[in-house]
Amino acid sequence: MIRGLKYALTQAFVQVFRNKGMSLASIFSITAMLLILGLFFFVTVNINIATESAKQQFNTIEVYLLEETSRDDADIITQSLLSMDEIAGVTYVSKEEAMEHFKDRWGDKAYLLEGLAENPLPNSLRVELTSLEDGQLIYEACRNLIGVEDVRYYQEEVKKILTITDFIQQGALIIILFLIIVSVVVVSNTVKLTVMARQREIMIMKYVGATNWFIRGPLLAEGMMIGCISAGIYLGLIWMIYSRMVELFSNQALLLFSTSFVEVGFMMRNLIWIFIALGMSIGAFGSILSMRRFLNA
């Protein structure tokens, strides 16, 4: 077995350098596919993180209480809400606390609020949801509570966030599968040319008793080697490109979405083996497809 493995690796190495033109074409094609796939994947990961951050900003419902609703009544409402599984927590916000928060948001212009004769803001309850999907249900339940004047829930914004998230996830899956299929076809065609060039040699090997797996081994190893080399080149390129993206756009992302890009080192550490395995798998599967046609595998 060890001898067979050594023979397969040696022959794969020889064939990669013997067919330099086709090998380089395959390496370039797989690297390009991995690069597009990786960039799309990195952008998708950061967009998903941004949407999750946005979800956290909209996972609350503001329940404004009537002026005559006392703190004891508010506590009763709170306990009623906490009994629902869809609610993660309820916080009482007095009108004084609401005014202080309002002043903080106004910043340098907060002095304009000092001239108010009385605080016009109501006492309220801040209801935290366990899931955005339950927002409409809780919104309707809060509207029917006694002692409640109004309920504010960013329904349209939530719908947009959920729609964007679903679209990104489904679109990412489709594009990733498409790129993988294209890469497999490219490698398959490259190995097919190698098999055709060695067809006479393969027939002689079969006549003298070589098994199909003995013949397949070098071709399979060749595809995996091409995929591994492509993944190594890709990782170097994606590291440089993503580092530059983080450097240029991280601050803007923080301002727009209240979240920064995923740190470069963390992303690369967690994805390096995934993309090496992906590159080798693409190469191996491309070889298998080609051999099934020519070796009746």
Image (cartoon, rainbow, N blue to C red):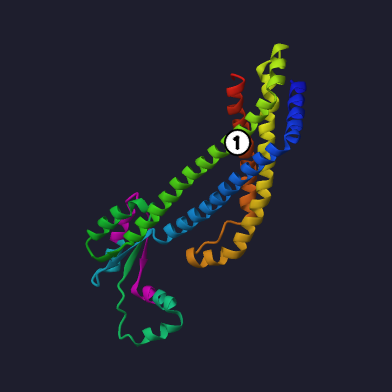
Query: Could you say where residue 151 lies in the image, as x and y percent from the top left?
Result: 28, 64
Q: Amino acid at mark 1?
A: Ile
Q: Is residue 83 shown in magenta?
A: yes
Residue 293, above or below 261:
above
Q: Nearer the viewer, residue 183 or 126?
A: 183
Q: Is 101 on the left-hand or right-hand side of 185?
A: left
Helix, strand or loop at label 1? It is: helix
Circle 1 packing at 10 Å, graded few (<14), some (14-19), many (20+), is: many
Number of marks: 1
Q: Nearer the viewer, residue 241 or 256?
A: 241
> For the magenta stretch, what is the residue range?
76-99
Q: Work out which quarter of the rendered image holds the N terminus and state it.
A: top right
Q: Is residue 261 shown in magenta?
A: no
Q: Is 38 on the left-hand or right-hand side of 209?
A: left
- Residue drawn at (69%, 30%) of the image: 221
- Residue drawn at (70%, 39%) of the image: 21
Residue at the disc numbered 1: 282
